[in-house]
Image: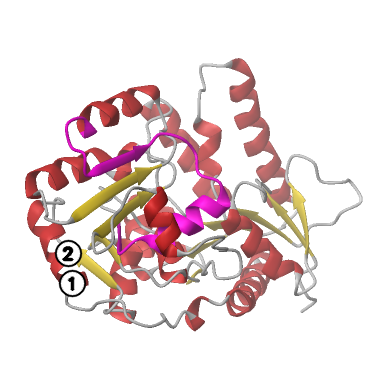
Amino acid sequence: MSPIKSLVTETVDLKSNPYLKLFYGSLRARGAEIYDITDTPETVVADVVHLHWPERFLRKLNKRQNKKALLRFLFTLANYKRRKIPIVWTVHNALPHEKHASRLSTAVFYRVLTYLVDGCLYMSETGRSQCESIHSALAAKPSAVVPHGHYRDVVNCSQSAEESRRQLGVGAGQCLIGHYGLIRGYKNTLQLIRVFNELSPQNTVLVIAGRSWSKTLEGEIERAVQGNDRIRYINRALDEDEMSNFVFASDLIALPYRRVSNSGAALYALSLNVPVLGPAQGAFLELQERHPDWVLTYEGEFSAQALGDALAWVGSGAGQGEVDLSAYDWDRLAGQTLEFYQRVKGSRSKG
């Protein structure tokens, strides 16, 4: 079978998304050319169409131009399917984290999408099971598990952990719990604040840094952190250096998500050899199984017990040395991805 040379994707937002930069960079290193589905030259004969976050087309459908963009996207996919060009979906989310459209519009969108898709990549076995239970049509289609890659090729600490801790107002000997990046409702940031206030752990500081998804959520966080001088809230987006510096300076990264299949934030923390706390869901379970000294999970709702256990775990010496992330090497994952493309391409040509 001929090698994969041309990939078309629904987003090539490489500058603002390091995952996509690493993912497509690894495929380019193996000879593939990448094109945006909205701006693919007519001379390009695509080998594969690869989707990542198609649910973004459900946002703000009350605006006419967004409705047109959604219909244009689905029409474009249908045209590729008619031409027997395989369509692969990396399922980051089986459903949108936030409600952007009506229940009917969302149901119709996924009914059409799951018909058009020829194969799915998942980042964990749990994620595959969850998605196929929601979208039963996908269970009969080719699939494979290719985990989220690490970030060691892009993390860059421009200062020492001690300098970052001083910048954050964290004293020597204090435990720093970090919660960084874009703040969205499903990430359960408000519950993290409530639990921290309830537990009130001694000699511990919680740092929350990142832009909020909405003004409403931003206001709720601002009110929740008031009155506790051991919570630092940095209400803005972090640049790449700040993100690396703050994570590296942390003793624990707390990710108390309500519902999750995958977590780039967990891989980012592990890339800097920082222990992670997360729910017993999705990829967290498989990360903990592979790296029990670096990833701790909890059952049920995030609670003071879960946070207390995590602090005791870190205090007992969890997360020493360097995490072995060879299983998440990007060239290795690129090879697995290309193998799956060929598998789907073969099954599509027979259909």
- Against 22, residue 300 (above or below) is above
How many C-alpha atoms fall within 10 Å of the one at disc 2: few (<14), some, or many (≥20)? many
Label 1 element class: helix
Mark 1, residue position: 315
Amino acid type at circle 1 is: Gly
Name which residue lies at 66% across and 45% down: 77
Residue 238 colored magenta? yes
For the residue pair 184 and 81, the one nearer the viewer reads as: 184
| Residue stretch rendered in magenta on the structure | 225-254
Q: Within the image, what quadrant is residue 75 found in?
A: top right
The part of the image, by quadrant, that contains residue 212 is top left
The tag on residue 196 is none
- Residue 265, position as x, y percentages in the image: 42, 57
Mark 2 in CB contact with mark 1 (< 8 angstroms) = yes
Disc 1 crowd, CA 10 A, few/some/many (<14, 14-19, 20+): few
Tell me, yes or no, whether the highlighted magenta stretch contains residue 245: yes
Tag 2 residue = 311
Q: Is residue 139 visible to the viewer in this orientation of the structure?
A: no
